[in-house]
Image: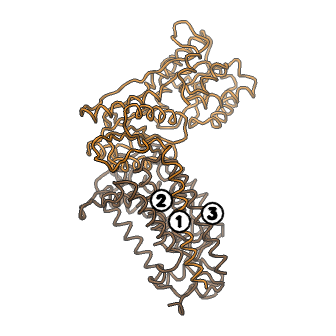
Chain colours: A orange, B brown
Amino acid sequence: MSRTARLSSAVLRAAAVTGVAALALTACGPGSGADSGSDSSGSGSGDVKVGLITKTDTNPFFVKMKEGAEKTAKAEGVELMTAAGKFDGDNAGQVTAIENMVAAGVKGILITPSDSKAIVPAIEKAKAKGVLVIALDTPTEPESAVDALFATDNVKAGELIGEYAKAAMKGKEAKIAALDLAPGVSVGVQRHEGFLKGFGATDKDVACAQDTGGDQAKGQTAMENCLQKEPDINVVYTINEPAALGAYTALKAKGREKDVLIVSVDGGCTGTQAVKDGKIAATSQQYPLKMAAEGVKAVVTYAKDGKKASGYTDTGVTLISDKAQDGVASKDTAYGLENCWG
Amino acid sequence: MTATSTPPSTSSPYAELKAPTTARRLLTAPTTGPLAALLLACAFFSLSTDQFLTGGNFSLIIQQVMVVGTLAIGQTLIILTAGIDLSCGAVMAFGSIVIARMAAEGTLPPLAAIGLGLVVCGGFGLLNGVLVQKIPLPPFIVTLGMLNVAFALTHIYSEEQTVTNLPGPLTALGETFPLGYTDVTYGSLVTIALFLLLAYALSSTGWGRHVYALGNSPEAARLNGIRTSRLTIGVYTVAGVLYGIAALLLISRTGVGDPQAGQTDNLDSITAVVLGGTSLFGGRGSVLGTFIGVLIVGVFRNGLQLMGVASIYQTLITGVLVILAVTVDQISRKKAR
C-alpha cells in the first residue's frame, strides 16, 4: 500500500509541478517584454537581442530603466531580455544572468553592476565572445572593463546639492548630518564627496554620518540617532529621497522639520513630489530612462555596422527646487515632476 | 521486490536501519516526482527555445548550480537529522573571504589558504553541532545566530572590500576543459563527485544508516547503540567542510572574493533540498534528490532567461514549486500512515 501511495504521490508531485510551471509561463510569457509572436526558430538573421541586467527587479529606479529599454527596443524592432539580482549586491545572480544572455545569443548587454569589481571577470568573458557590454548608472572598477558607460555624474549630482545647501544657509554655521548608502559603494561615496566639495566642507565638518542602504526606515532610524547625538543639526545630506523622507519623519517627530535643510539626490517621482511639498529643499534629478534608451540604441548601432560605443556618456543631472538660490542654477518641481522616474 | 520493500516512513524507527538499495530508491518516491518534473521542464524548454538543448548550455547550468549544489549537500545531511542550517551561505562567504585574502595578500601560499578556509568552515560546522547537541539548542536558533556571526565576520575581515587579483590555484576549478562539443569546468566535476560520494555514504555505509535513523527518532537511534551526540556533531562538521568547498567553488566561478556573496544561498539550498523530496521533518530523502532539486532551480532560471522571461517570474515559480513540494510531502506522509 505504502509503495503505491508513494508512487502516486510522485506522479502527483510531477504533474502539479509541471502544471504550475506551464500556467505561470503562459500567463507571463507574452506580456513580459520580449517581442511576442516573433518566431525565434526562424533564420536567425534579423533578430537582434539586447540584454538588460539591473541590480534588482523591485527598485522603481530600475523599473523605470527597464521601461526605457522596452520602449526603445520596441521602436528599434529588437528583442529585449531582462534579468536582475535578487537583492542589491547579488553578484552571483548577475554573473548567471550574463552567462544565460550570452548563451541566448545577445548582441549587447546593458548592466547596472551590483558589485563594481566582482562583476568584471564575467563581463570580460562576455566581451571575449564578441558581446558589447555597456554599464548603466554605476561604473565598473576599472571603468575600462566595459565598452562604455552611460551614467549620471554622481560627483556632480552631489556638488549641485552641496552648492545649493551652502547658498541656502546664507552664511549660518552649518551642523551637517550625512545619511549615506553603504561602505565601499561608489555611487554613495561619489555623491557624498561631491556634496562636501559643493558645500566647501570636509568630512571633519560632518557631525554625524550613518549608512542607510538608501532605505526610508533605516534613514529614519539613522536621523533619530543623529539627533540624539547632535541635537542642533541643521543640514542633512541624504543619498536618495527615501532616506531623505525617513530623515524628515524623524525631524518632524522632534518638531524640527521647518528649520532643518534636507538635500538629496535621485529625482524619483515620490521624491520630487516631496520637494514640491516642502519636505525636501532640493534634489539632484537623474535620468534612468535615458540611460537605458541610449544603451539600447548603442547595441542596435553595433549590430548594424559593428561600431562599438565607447567611453563615458553623461546622461545628465538637474537640480530641482522650488526655492531657487542666487548663483545656483535649478529648475522648479513642475519640470521635475514632468521628468521624474518611478 | 514488493515483498521486501521497506517503507521509509512507517512508525517503526528500525525500518530505516535497513538501507534501501539504490535501484529501489530510484524507483520509489520521493526522488521520482522531482526527476519527472525536471525532465518535463527540460522537455518544455527544449521545445520553447533553440538554445536550451545544447551540450554547452547543459554544462553552463551545472556550472551555475555548483555552489548552491555543494551547500545543499551539507544542508541535506543536516535536514536528514531533522535539523536545519541557516548559516551555510554566510559561513561560505566568510570562508571565501579568508581564502581570497590570505592568498591574494600572500599571507599564506594558495593551497594553505584553501586548507585554512576548509578548516574555518568546518570549525563553524563543528560549533553549530556542539551547540545543537550539547546545550542543547534548536538548530534553527543556533544557525540563525551563526548566520549573523559569520556575516559580520565576513564584513569585518574583508573591510567591505572585494578581493581581486587572485592567484591561479584559487580559480583553477573555474577553468574549463573540452568534453565532446562542449567545455566543462573542473568545479562541475567536483560538485558531481561530491554528490555521488555522499549519496554512496548515505545509502551504503553504516554512517548513512545512522543518519537516517537519527532523523527518524533520536531516542530510538540512541537505544539502538548509535552514538547520536557524536553523529550529530559529525554531520554538522561535514556540512561545514562542504561549505568550505563551496567557498572555493564560488571564488573559482566569479574570480573574486566577494563579501556580499551567499546572502540568499541558505534559503536557496533549503529550496533545493525540499524540491528534491527530502522531508523537512528528517529521516527521509536523499542527496541525489537534492541534486535534482538544484537542477530544477537551475533549469528554470536558465530556461526562462533563454525564453526572455523576466527574472521576477523565476522567483514566483520557485516559490510556488516549493509550496507544492512540501504539500505533496505532507499528503504522501498522511497516506503512508
Q: CA distance from mark 1 to mark 2?
A: 9 Å
How many other residues sit within 10 Å of disc 1, few (<14), some (14-19) or many (≥20)?
A: many
Disc 3 crowd rating (10 Å Cα; few below 14, some 14-19, many 20+) is some
Residue B92 point in image, percent of width and height: 47, 58
Q: Report the amino acid beneath label 1.
A: Leu
Q: Is residue A65 visible?
A: yes
Which mark lies nearer to you, 2 or 3? Answer: 2
State whether residue A247 is above or below residue B155. Answer: above
Give me the chain letter of mark 3: B
Q: Amino acid at mark 2?
A: Val
Question: Would you name the residue on which mark 2 appears?
Answer: B297
Instruction: Say whether mark 3 and mark 2 are on the same chain.
Output: yes
Chain ID of residue with mark 2:
B
Spot occupied by residue B53 in the image (x, y as percentages of width and height): 34, 60
Residue at 59% over, 23% down: A272
A46 vs A62, left or right, is left
Q: Do marks 1 and 2 both belong to one polypeptide chain?
A: yes
Distance in Å between CA atoms under marks 2 and 3: 24 Å
Can you name the residue that lies furthest to the bottom here? B3
Q: Name the residue beneath numbered marker 3.
A: B140
Residue at numbered disc 1? B275
Split into 4 quadrants, where in the image is the N terminus of chain A?
bottom right
Q: Secondary structure at mark 3?
A: helix
Instruction: Name the kind of residue labelled 3 in the image.
Output: Phe
Q: CA distance from mark 3 to mark 1?
A: 20 Å
Quick check: do tags 3 and 1 share a chain? yes
